[in-house]
Image (tube, rainbow, N blue to C red):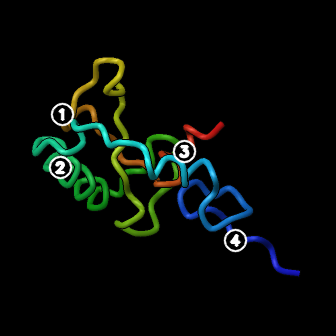
Amino acid sequence: MTLPKPCIKCGKPGKPLCDHCRARLHRPVNPRYREPEYIRNRRLMIDRAWINLEPCVICGRPFASKSDITAEHIVSLRRGGDNSLDNLGPAHGRCNFGKHAP
């Protein structure tokens, strides 16, 4: 018996892309994520986290590869946070996207 493949976004077993993550794919993207400052600072934060072996800010585990690192806003944009380098932290994709799961 084989186990069902986990969701590629949140890791929930069952489907390669669970219904919750599939619905999130079709949501409009906040325009602040397209700002040059965010794009530049996100790249810098990912490079810094990989070079300095910084752990995930959510779970505390290390990253297996540089492609596993996503940008997590320490203070969310909705709560008045910004896209500055000081407000971005490294997080696993599963940790970052999974925290919004119901």
Residue 4 falls left or right of residue 30: right
Q: Which of the 4 image quadrants contains residue 87?
A: top left
Tell me which numbered mark, 1 or 4, is placed earlier along the sequence: 4
Tell me which numbered mark, 2 or 4, is placed earlier along the sequence: 4
Q: Are marks 3 and 2 in contact (CB under 8 Å)?
A: no
Secondary structure category for the residue under label 1: loop
Q: CA distance from mark 2 to mark 4?
A: 32 Å
Q: In this figure, which residue is indicated by the disc labeled 3? A: 59
Residue 53 falls left or right of residue 48: right
Q: How far across and down, in percent of the image, does residue 67 sit?
A: 37, 66
Q: In this figure, which residue is indicated by the disc labeled 2? A: 39
Q: Which of the 4 image quadrants contains residue 47?
A: bottom left
Residue 94 falls left or right of residue 47: right
Q: Are marks 1 and 4 in contact (CB under 8 Å)?
A: no
Q: Which residue lies at the image location 33% right of the left edge and 47% below the top edge?
A: 71
Q: How far across and down, in percent of the image, does residue 41 sit?
A: 17, 45
**Image disc number at residue 84:** 1
